[in-house]
Amino acid sequence: MTERNNSAWSPSSREIERQSSRRAINRKQVLIAAVSSLLVLGTLALVLVTSPGWTTVKSTFFDVEYGKEVFPTVIKGLWINLQLTFIGGAAIGLIALGLALLRTTKSPTLTPFRFLATAYVDIFRGAPLILIILLVGFGVPALGLKGISSNVIFLGTVAVVLTYSAYVAEVIRSGILSIHPSQRAAARSLGLSSGQTMRFVVLPQAIRRVVPPLLNDFVSLLKDTGLVSILGVTDAVRAAQINASRTFNYTPYVVAAILFLLITIPMTRYTDRAIRQRTNAQSAEGAI
Amino acid sequence: MSNVLELKNVRKSFGAEVVLNDLSLVVPEHTATVLIGASGSGKSTLLRCVNLLETIDDGQIFLDGKEISDPLINVDDVRRKLGMVFQSFNLFPHKTVLENITLAPIKVQGKSAEEARIAAKALLSRFDLADKADQYPDRLSGGQQQRVAIIRSIAVNPRLLLLDEITSALDPVLVNEVLSIVRDLKGDGMTMVLATHEMGFATQVADEVCFLESGNILERGSADAVLHNPKNPKTQEFLRRVHQAGRL
């Protein structure tokens, strides 16, 4: 494309006039937004602060001094959640990829595994995570198998991995199915085998497409690691619970919630941006 | 001169609709066979059957005298000998132009990455696309994408090139740059079968023109005979309509 020189251009008087009226419109919109935000948020704050139980709520949920005191134990618990998220996340990625590939393969040798993968996804996607955590956490140690750890952190992680692998497998599979058949036809007509076609042509495009939904699942995973606290794992939720039940002050829960939000909000913002970029890229791809 | 491709009494239907009906065709080495006919006459299906993207219902297809319609044949081996170019280009959007071209030579033919790159760059230079080697397909015009797709299909040195209405999705001003590659390849002695609506181009490259109608070849012969002096009234009617559309 030819570059055109823009430096010699100076706006006409008409354009200057238009720019100033655009600025005026902008100023008006900013003012309206500010006034309406102030009204709505102010009313909400007012209702909260003037409610009859506010002083009690303030001292039992928002006790700053107590919050500072429990902060170290809660953040120590949060470290467990983060470890669980990253180690679990890696295992989930691998298992889910395997499940998605099995569910989309047409190879006759893999037929039994395809059925098993489908059954697996049906079961673990359909059952509540908390039930899986309870079943694995209390059921597996009861089996008394040698060589299988009865460490609650390990069992909790296994339960979360089992469930999330099913979710993530479906996301990856939907990505694989979204690649147009003409891409496969082009690859096969070049002589690539079906495995090579999957590996070099279909999967790279599919994964790129499902990154945003996978990031969403990653945020959910971090939050859901809090559920392993029911097995007695001293994560952020459990640490808050221990403190709260000792003093009957619920500030530790608020501390834990704020800590989770400090991580999840930037992550969701990043995800939103990734989705926006993905949508832009897709519209630019056009016919492809 | 040996025959590269031979179709004997090929039949193909999709459900109740018969798309190829008892169709026979011979394509000798170094020749170009052009398939013309209205949309739905079976041109694309014929090409897809040769490439084994579709399974035929009856008859036989031979490539270099070997039957490829045998269900026991290794499909990948057959496709290695065939190049196919599609109407919609079908370049891989996540790979650069160079990677698109070198994928099959490296993964299918087992060439070293370096060797494949050198060969691909030589082809790109020959067809004036050397500066696009590291671009992604979405940065290229439709004509450039289709030229890359053609280069990708010949990078594996196919015995037979199948071209399926390769200019139908293009802006008219881009058609010629694509067809000139095909003319060059024909000059190299590449054996090819093409489905096209570009009658002027057909006249230039075709050794044989076949007019398809409802899955049958109604008329076949030299470009001059079929395109300029058609005997069959249906061919005459078709060409008259093409002429009205300004394509002859």
Image (spheres, coloured by chain):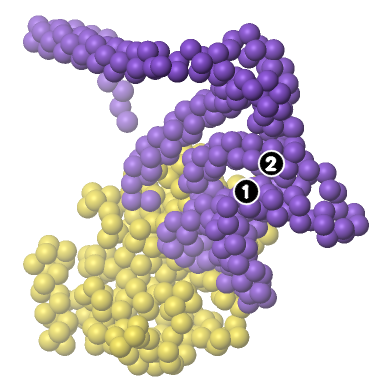
Chain colours: A purple, B yellow
- Same chain for mark 2 and mark 1? The answer is yes
Residue A255 visible (yes or no):
no
Query: Relative to B62, does residue B44 appear above or below in the rendering?
Result: above
Q: Residue at x 29, y 86 (%)?
A: B17
User: Quick one: label 2, few (<14), some, or many (20+) residues within 10 Å?
Assistant: some
Query: Decide: marks 2, 1 in contact (CB < 8 A)?
Result: yes
Q: Secondary structure at mark 2?
A: helix
| N-terminal label among 2 and 1 | 1
Left or right position of B241 against B17: left
Residue with the most extreme right position: A146
Residue A138 visible (yes or no):
yes
Query: Relative to A160, does residue A51 appear above or below in the rendering?
Result: above
Q: Residue at x 61, y 36 (%)?
A: A222
Amino acid type at circle 1 is Ile
Q: Residue B204 in the image: x percent, y percent?
A: 28, 66
Amino acid type at circle 2 is Ile
Q: Quadrant of residue A200?
A: bottom right
Q: Which residue is mark 1?
A: A130
Q: Which mark, residue B7?
A: none
Quadrant for the C terminus of chain B in the image: bottom left
Q: Quadrant of residue B195?
A: bottom left
Q: Which residue is mark 2?
A: A230
Left or right position of B82 against A79: left
Q: Secondary structure at mark 1?
A: helix
